[in-house]
Amino acid sequence: MQLSARNQLKGKVKEIKEGPVSTEVILDVNGTDIVASITSGSVHAMGLNVGDDATAVIKASSIMIGK
Protein backbone atom coordinates (compact mmCIF):
# COMPACT_ATOMS: atom_id res chain seq x y z
CA MET A 1 0.00 0.00 0.00
CA GLN A 2 1.31 3.45 -0.86
CA LEU A 3 0.54 6.42 1.38
CA SER A 4 1.04 10.15 0.91
CA ALA A 5 2.31 10.52 4.49
CA ARG A 6 6.08 11.03 4.49
CA ASN A 7 6.64 10.35 8.19
CA GLN A 8 6.67 6.57 8.43
CA LEU A 9 8.53 4.90 11.29
CA LYS A 10 9.11 1.15 11.06
CA GLY A 11 9.34 -0.80 14.29
CA LYS A 12 8.17 -3.80 16.28
CA VAL A 13 5.05 -4.02 18.44
CA LYS A 14 6.39 -3.94 22.00
CA GLU A 15 3.16 -3.90 23.97
CA ILE A 16 -0.61 -3.84 23.44
CA LYS A 17 -2.80 -2.35 26.18
CA GLU A 18 -6.30 -3.33 25.14
CA GLY A 19 -9.39 -1.48 26.29
CA PRO A 20 -13.05 -2.00 25.48
CA VAL A 21 -13.10 0.70 22.78
CA SER A 22 -9.56 1.96 22.22
CA THR A 23 -6.22 0.21 22.53
CA GLU A 24 -2.72 1.59 23.04
CA VAL A 25 -0.17 0.04 20.72
CA ILE A 26 3.45 0.68 21.66
CA LEU A 27 6.03 0.34 18.89
CA ASP A 28 9.75 0.07 19.51
CA VAL A 29 11.37 2.19 16.80
CA ASN A 30 15.15 1.83 17.15
CA GLY A 31 14.93 1.95 20.96
CA THR A 32 12.33 4.73 21.11
CA ASP A 33 8.74 3.96 22.08
CA ILE A 34 6.01 5.35 19.84
CA VAL A 35 2.51 5.10 21.31
CA ALA A 36 -0.63 5.10 19.18
CA SER A 37 -4.21 4.93 20.39
CA ILE A 38 -6.33 3.06 17.86
CA THR A 39 -9.68 1.30 18.03
CA SER A 40 -9.71 -2.17 19.52
CA GLY A 41 -11.56 -3.31 16.39
CA SER A 42 -8.62 -2.18 14.24
CA VAL A 43 -6.18 -4.15 16.40
CA HIS A 44 -8.25 -7.29 15.86
CA ALA A 45 -8.84 -6.62 12.14
CA MET A 46 -5.09 -6.23 11.54
CA GLY A 47 -4.27 -9.20 13.74
CA LEU A 48 -1.68 -7.16 15.66
CA ASN A 49 0.42 -9.09 18.15
CA VAL A 50 3.46 -8.33 20.28
CA GLY A 51 6.58 -8.91 18.20
CA ASP A 52 4.94 -8.05 14.87
CA ASP A 53 6.62 -5.64 12.46
CA ALA A 54 4.49 -2.52 12.07
CA THR A 55 4.78 1.03 10.81
CA ALA A 56 3.69 4.20 12.59
CA VAL A 57 2.34 6.63 9.99
CA ILE A 58 2.28 10.21 11.22
CA LYS A 59 0.15 12.67 9.29
CA ALA A 60 -0.59 15.96 10.99
CA SER A 61 -1.22 19.52 9.88
CA SER A 62 0.75 20.82 12.86
CA ILE A 63 3.14 19.54 15.48
CA MET A 64 3.53 21.27 18.84
CA ILE A 65 6.77 21.30 20.83
CA GLY A 66 7.03 22.59 24.37
CA LYS A 67 9.81 23.09 26.84
Image (spheres, rainbow, N blue to C red):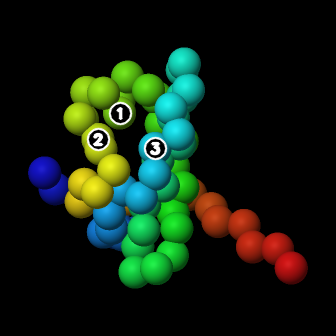
**What residue occupies the far right of the structure in this picture?**
67
- Say if 32 sits above or below 41 in the image: below
CB atoms at circles 1 and 2 under 8 Å apart? Answer: yes
> Is 64 left, or right, of 27 in this rendering?
right
**Looking at the image, is 23 positioned above or below residue 6?**
above
Q: Residue at x 23, y 35 (%)?
A: 47
The 10 Å Cα crowd at callout 1, few under 14, some 14 to 19, many 20 or more, is some
Q: Are marks 3 and 2 in contact (CB under 8 Å)?
A: yes
The picture places residue 39, in percent across and down from the top left corner, at 46, 29
Residue labelled with disc 1:
43
Q: Which residue is mark 2?
A: 48
Give the mark, 3 or 2, whose residue is nearer the N terminus.
3
What label does residue 16 carry, if any? 3
- Judging depth in this view, the residue of 2 and 27 nearest the camera is 27
What residue is shown at x 82% (from left), y 74% (from top)? 66
Local SS, label 1:
helix
How far apart marks 3 and 2 lie (CA) works out to 9 Å
For badge 1, the amino acid type reads: Val
Q: What distance separates the C-alpha of mark 3 from that of mark 1?
A: 9 Å
* C-alpha distance separating marks 1 and 2: 5 Å
